[in-house]
Image: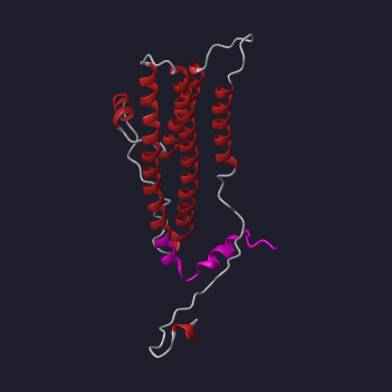
Amino acid sequence: MDSTTDELTPEEYEKAFAGKELQALEQALDIRKFEIELYWKRATYFWTFIGASLAGFIAIQASDFANKQDLSIILASLGLVFSFAWFCANRGSKFWQENWEKHVDQLEDKVTGPLYKIILARNKPASIREKCVDVVTGPGRISVSKVNQLISLYVCLLWVVLLGYSLPEFDIDKSVNWFYVLIIGLSICTCLSFLWLGKSYGGGYFHTAQRRKSRVRPANQSRKADA
């Protein structure tokens, strides 16, 4: 079966939207805005689970439960999986957000001009005092989404440290705790599946279509005849 995904040249891209630049630009801006809204909703979703796991881990560490170590390893594994899922979701959201931003870059010239590509900045500080004040209170070309990605990576590494802290001391003479091996192995496989199975499909689609029939049965027609 032939692929339905083709790489476009700049000329083919312009031809695809010729005469429809305004509608395409409005659509791209709306979807970009929608992607940004979803980005922060996903962050809230993951932080709920990560925060609950961290609170549970701290509570377990402060308790005197007999199975304290088992529960700590389970919670640390859960926290690691949720944090790595958050990290991957951040990267995925950034990919689609940039996709629509690039569409805006290409489409805006013929509609509004290069508004989105032109950056206006304040004057550079003239004195050392102004430079010091600007470092603290001034704006900076820092990507909010990149900061969020770095935070999610930090939280992942933190859970790795907490998981290692929860494990018993290594002793070659002790038997292997297969419960711990199963929990940690399952967590690692789940994280790897995000990278392998979680990728968006980039190939072409061949659609199938079905149309159901609907009609009003005449009053003088029996159900048996209708069947």
Q: Judge whether 20 appears above or below 78 on screen.
A: below
Q: Residue 221 location in percent, x, y?
A: 43, 89
The residue drawn where x is 37% and y is 43% is 40
**Could you say which is closer to the camera, residue 107 or residue 202?**
202
Region of the chain picked out in magenta, as a range:
1-27
Residue ID at (46%, 40%): 90
* 2 left or right, relative to 96: right
**Quadrant of the frame with the N terminus:** bottom right
Q: Residue 180 at what x, y percent from top left?
A: 55, 23
Is residue 29 depicted above or below 225 in this figure? above
Which quadrant of the structure image shows residue 86? top left
Q: Nearer the viewer, residue 176 or 101?
A: 176
User: In the rendered structure, does residue 201 fall within the stretch colored magenta?
Assistant: no
Compared across the picture, whether 144 is left or right of 6 comes to left
Q: How many numbered dots are placed on residues in this image?
A: 0
Q: Is 90 placed above or below 150 here?
A: below
Q: From the viewer's perspective, tell me whether residue 146 is left or right of residue 121.
A: right
